[in-house]
Image (cartoon, rainbow, N blue to C red):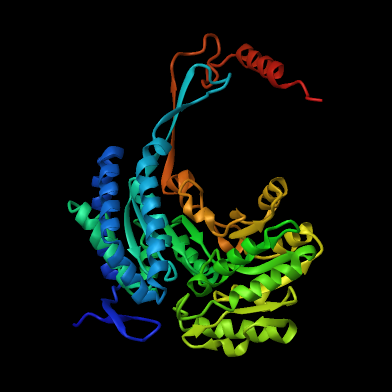
Amino acid sequence: MATLTFDSLNPATGAVVGTHPKQDATAVREAVGRAEEAAAWWAALGPAGRRRRLLDYKAVLAGRLRELAELVHEETGKPVGDAALELVLTITHLDWAARNADKVLRRRRVRTGMIGVNLEATLEYLPLGVVGVIGPWNYPVFTPMGSIAYALAAGNAVVFKPSELTPGVGVRLAELFAESVPERPVLQAVTGLGETGAALAADPRIKKIAFTGSTATAKRVMAACAENLTPIVAECGGKDAFIVDADADVRAAADACLWGALSNAGQTCVGVERVYVVDAVYEPFMRELSERVASVKAGRDYGPITMPGQLDIIRRHIDDAVKSGRAVTGGPSSVRAPYVDPVIVEDVPEDSPAVREETFGPTITVRRTRDAREALELANASAYGLAGTVFSRNTRRARELARLMRSGMTAINSVISFAGVPALPFGGVGDSGFGRIHGADGLREFARPKAVARQRFPLPGMNLTSFTRRPDELERLIRIVTFLHGRRKR
């Protein structure tokens, strides 16, 4: 019987970029079986062996950067320059994971406390085994590699199911890895539609799933994982807020706001969708924003909407927003498939779908607020909590606003800058998901903590964990604990 296939298409032209197999549950099981054997070998290499191979993989990716950027451009439609930037960020994260895994995960001694004075205690982080990664289409290299690189560095093998919209990118990443690690299939790509991802999540040999996608799909993946109690790290959508304080540099704020909202056609989970501007600078900010957006063109500065079905959501949000608010730039006619021109609407009610739901298009809503405190309250009144931005010249107030923003990451006087810092964890709260990739937290996300306590010598006259324990031994312990911990602090 012939193998079923599907095509990946250039969303801007409709041209076929590549044809790939629809790998069924049997094919996925076989891939996981190969990964199990590879995982044992990869873990046995030790930190130094994995580090050398991952740094070699990094060099291979850097050497093929232009080729990969062109492939990302063809499958997503984003400009080649934006695709190259995505790859640059990926390479820096891979480098950090490879160089820091041993330091973060290695065995270390921990304090035992007074009661454990006769013990030696150690903590280390061990590989899980096989990790399944289900990737998105909007950043088909940077986002899944945020899980893949850290999972590999932690000593795991990976089976990667790329989005059906960008399968060629995922296949190429696995092929290039094999150039650096030809001995075993430590990183494999399986291609297909939703059924392929479901088979991966349902395989009991998968020790963790890393998923990036919509909140609704994350719930379905979690349900599949629940059958085997497979843990999951989920990076879902966002409705990220951008706060402009009274003392902000409005020119810099407007410039960053537009990039955060319009780059990648707004198809960025940590992109700007809601803007809250303090009254004192509202008018100059809006003038600056309006002037700058006039020079940004869909099809030149950013690409098409990659997933055709998203156009209906974008259109619905725009229609609703302009009915209740005031269009500053664009409107319903901005949707001209596969492109969407920039849309800015002000005074949209907070209960509008354009404010409450993730749009994932080049649109923003702008609202005037009395002060930064009201802006923060509105920013936090969302089911999502992925990222956000604060613009203010007052460093102390900006840091406080950033800390209080209900999000996993916040940028100050910049936009999405946290993604370029490999040491920072990346992830959200609420409907934006849970768990973390990147940084030390990302390495530990793909490892299991192993605690060991060794008795160095028996405590004289105090054998507490024995049926031969005497009443006076327990009484002695109670007196010690009362002396150490019984005094209340005033």
Q: Position of residue 168 (x, y in %)?
A: 30, 71
Residue positioned 47% across, 57% down in the render = 232
Residue 102, above or below 5: above
Quadrant where the C terminus lies? top right
> Splitting the image into 4 quarters, where does residue 166 fall?
bottom left
Q: Position of residue 43 (x, y in %)?
A: 29, 43
Residue 388, above or below 348: above
> Splitting the image into 4 quarters, where does residue 315 fall?
bottom right
Looking at this view, is 62 or 351 the one in front?
62
Q: Position of residue 469 (x, y in %)?
A: 56, 16
- Can residue 123 be seen in the rendering of this structure? yes
- The number of numbered discs placed on residues in the rendered structure image is 0
Looking at this view, is 55 or 308 the one in front?
55
Quadrant where the N terminus lies? bottom left
205 sits to left or right of 356 = left
95 sits to left or right of 235 = left
Residue 91, above or below 352: above
399 sits to left or right of 487 = left
Residue positioned 74% across, 73% down in the render = 350
Q: Position of residue 310 (x, y in %)?
A: 51, 81
> Splitting the image into 4 quarters, where does residue 432 fall?
bottom right
Residue positioned 37% across, 86% down in the render = 13
- Can residue 193 be seen in the rendering of this structure? no
Residue 229, above or below 169: above
